[in-house]
Amino acid sequence: MARRLGLPGSRADRVRVAGVLHDIGKIGVADSILRKPGALTTREQEAMKRHPEIGAWILDPDVADIRGWVLAHHERPDGRGYPFGLGGDSIPVEARILSVADAYEAMTTDRVYRRSVGVEAACAELRECTGTQFDSQAVDALLQCLAVRDRVVGP
C-alpha cells in the first residue's frame, strides 16, 4: 500500500514495521476487555481507545516516526477518530495506511466477538466508509493490492 501511494522503499519498510507494532498498546488493556465475547460497555470502550497512546508511550523514542503513526492509526479523515480528533491531511499518510490495513484485517479475521465478514464484505465496507472513516487513497491502494494478489494467486 505504501509503495502504491508513492512512498520510497525505506519508508514503506518503516510502515511495514509499524503494521506489526501498531496495536502494541493493547498490552495495557485488560484481557477481560480484549477477549470479551460481547459488546463493550462505554467504560470498556474508553479503556480500549487508550491503546494508541499506550503504544506510543511504550515505543522507544528512537522510532519517533513509528510512534507518531501508532498514535494516529485510529484518527479519521472526518475528524471523528481518536485520540486527538485529527482529520484529513493532519493525519500522517502512514497512519492512514495502518488504519485501512488494520480495519481490513479485523473484518476478515474471526474474533471472539464475531466471525469474519469475508473479503467482499470488507472491501464493500471500506469503500462505503471512504472519506469519513478511511482515507480514499489508502483504500484504493489496498483494493489495488488485493486485485493484483487475486490475479497472481487466483480464485
Image (cartoon, rainbow, N blue to C red):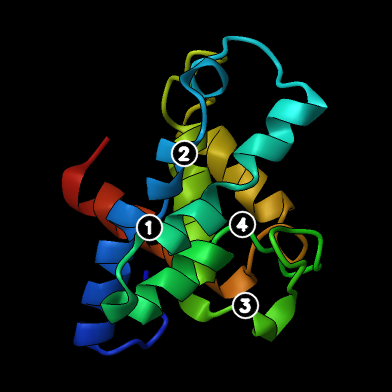
Tell whether label 1 touches label 2 (CB within 8 Å).
Answer: yes
Q: Which residue is mark 1?
A: 58
Front residue of this view, candidates 54 and 132:
54
First of labels 2, 1 by sequence position: 2
| Amino acid type, callout 2 | Gly
| Amino acid type, callout 1 | Ile
Local secondary structure at mark 1? helix
Q: Which residue is mark 3?
A: 91
| Amino acid type, callout 4 | His
| Amino acid type, callout 3 | Ile
Q: Which residue is mark 4?
A: 74
Q: Marks 1 and 4, Cα distance to the nearest angstrom? A: 17 Å
Q: In percent of the image, x 32 and y 70: which residue is there?
A: 15
Badge 2 crowding class, 10 Å Cα cut-off, few under 14, some 14 to 19, many 20 or more, is some
Q: Position of residue 76 (x, y in %)?
A: 70, 64
Tell whether label 4 touches label 1 (CB within 8 Å).
Answer: no
Q: Marks 4 and 3, Cα distance to the nearest angstrom? A: 10 Å
